[in-house]
Amino acid sequence: MPNKNPFPWVPRGWVNAVFPWLRWSLMWFYTFTYRTLSLLPSLRDRSAAQPLTALADRQLLACGSCVSVNIGRGIPKKRVQEALVTPLGLLGDSQSAPYIAIWGGHAGFNKAVMLWSSEVIAAVNADAAGGGPAEFFYGASGEQFTLSGVDWSVMKTGVHVLLGTSVLLEVTLLKGPCKQLDRYFSAPGDKGRIDPKKFPEKSRVLAKVLR
């Protein structure tokens, strides 16, 4: 989601109105492609192996697991057993904010998914500084993937994240807290606890889908 109109010759309102329909169309195109590949074992297996091949020459920084997949409109998101990952995010997931927003937000190809850490969530909830403990749960902050066992200090821009054997992400941005998260803190000012400018090791991260 950009903070400036990427199509300056088109009125901003038009872009915001058309984007949800464009995204919906592309999501179902990706779904059709995925289902077609699933009927052709040779193509499916070749596609699934590509992310592992792409990481063959990279240094392993951390290893963990995905403990929750979360989708829904806006926040909080609902935990589900599985979801199809596409270059525009997860099927069944969407944002309530407009495509072009002055605060940036998340959506589009470069901010397709958000990730957060279960250990960070537990630490933020247990921190009684400021107004008191927070009340986050998986998907509450808008993250589509909640990971566990990963040293969150290594989650920086440019880092590649492999989910399973077929989904490859690249971290594009450390996401700052917005006013939508005030509901989970005892005091609005407490959301600075997950501000990447102050505590990058506790920040949520946005990523694009490489494969």
Image (spheres, helix red, strand yellow):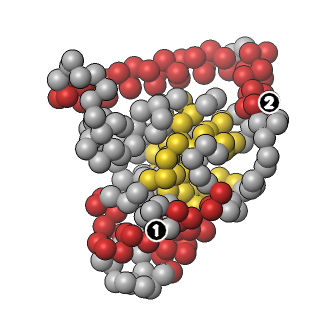
56 horizontally vs 66: left or right: right
The quadrant in which the N terminus is found is top left
* Residue occupying the far front of the picture: 197
Image coordinates of residue 183 in percent, x first then y, are 31, 67
**Dot 1 crowding, Cα within 10 Å, few <14, some 14–19, many 20+:** few
Does label 1 or label 2 sit earlier along the sequence?
2
According to the image, label 1 marks what residue? Answer: 198
Q: Nearer the viewer, residue 3 or 137?
A: 3
Secondary structure, mark 1, is loop
* Residue for point 52% across, 62% down: 200
According to the image, label 2 marks what residue? Answer: 53
Label 1 vs label 2: CA separation?
Answer: 36 Å
Q: Nearer the viewer, residue 168 or 44?
A: 168
Q: Is residue 65 above or below residue 89?
A: below
Image coordinates of residue 50 in percent, x first then y, are 75, 26
Disc 2 marks a residue whose amino acid type is Thr
Image coordinates of residue 178 in percent, x first then y, are 32, 58
Disc 1 marks a residue whose amino acid type is Lys
Image coordinates of residue 207 in percent, x first then y, are 53, 42
Q: Does residue 140 appear in this view?
A: no
Q: Does residue 8 appear in this view?
A: yes
